[in-house]
Amino acid sequence: SQCPGVCSDGALRSLPLPNLATVTRKAAREYFDNSWALYEVMFAGLNGEEPFYRPPVHGLRHPQIFYYGHTPCLYINKLRVSGVLEKPVNAYFESIFEVGVDEMLWDDMHKNDMVWPTVAEVHEYRKQVYETVVEAIETHPSLSDDGVLVNQEHPFWALFMGFEHERIHLETSSVLFRETPLHLVQTPHHWPPMHPSSKRSSLTTQPTESVDFPSNRMVSVSGSNVDLGKPADFPSYGWDNEYGERRVNVPDFQASENMVTNGEFFQFVTDGGYRNEKYWCDDGWAWRTHRNMKWPFFWEPSGPSGSNEYSLRAIFEVVPMQWDWPVDVNYYEAKAYCRWKVRRLFSEAIRRP
């Protein structure tokens, strides 16, 4: 209850981004504690040790034990590079947990063949890293109680890199949790409750547009010049590809008023979208056929085969299908949907008198 970010309902939520123009020891410690606790709470959602070592069904990521050790490893390695720390906490762990999956080099998945440390060993390592980083925050002379500017030349820029890195993995690991069989996860204490709409139970299995999900009209947007790039002195952490300056001329275009909902995507599914190769790019169709995908991954069939009745898998539970929620799909599925939608809009335009 004393952790920064714990709300009156007992749920742990993220603190706002810190202002790097005036970083105090207290602010750095609170954001570190909040980031660390968010990650620990999420991993408390694994039910037993099996899900720590069970590779994801697609085989494109390491098992969760790697990600449990990866984020503390980065804190230590980057703080060593910046000169804040002089020595490793556990040199072996800081070697095996250092590099994750490079999306351009799939051969680094060979680490899945190794014997990973036990959960208890990685948990103990995390405790040691936590104590080491706290001591650095509280004693290193480059920080103060009054506040200092932390920019890219400051040694604690590495600490804020660790914060952002940990929160990236909070998001990406939550997807791996959502892909894990339901009996291997549990809703952890202090995890924020789902949106109240998830408790709606009297939902139809055959949704109707404008009733169960909103019509999603296309909105015209006037073209203009768009300036891209983050100023070097902006007081928040940024990755290297965020900086620089670039002006892009964007022509007139149309965009949907809202994000595409489960209800809209249901129309694509029931219209045979997953069976019709013409909607898919070559790589997308190869992926769909290899995985034998017939609907989005997080849709769970809840009726007889062919009935097109689905529930929705969340991170730690399955809820009734929420037709007005945004759909979760990958790039290939989104691209196929857009091709289908264009053909449908064109056909509707032709049929109009």
Image (tube, rainbow, N blue to C red):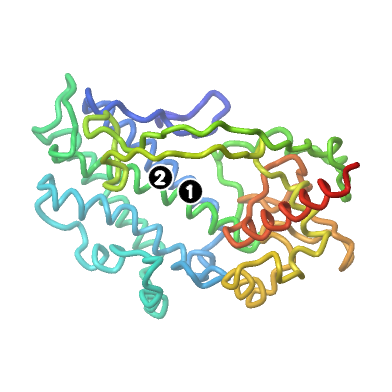
Q: Residue at x 29, y 37 (%)?
A: 237
Rendered image quadrant of residue 280? bottom right
Per the rendering, the mark at residue 353 is: none
Q: Residue at x 8, y 33 (%)?
A: 141
Position of 40 relative to 120 (above/below): above
> Dot 1 corresponds to which residue?
171
Most foreground residue, 23 or 215: 215
C-beta proximity under 8 Å, tags 1 and 2:
yes
Most foreground residue, 4 or 292: 292
Q: CA distance from mark 1 to mark 2?
A: 6 Å
Residue 228 in the image: state x and y as whole percent. Answer: 36, 37
Three-letter residue code for mark 1: Glu
In the picture, the quarter occupied by the C terminus is: top right
Determine whether the residue tagged by mark 1 lies in a helix, strand or loop.
helix
Q: Residue at x 80, y 64 (%)?
A: 272
Position of 40 compared to 286: left or right?
A: left
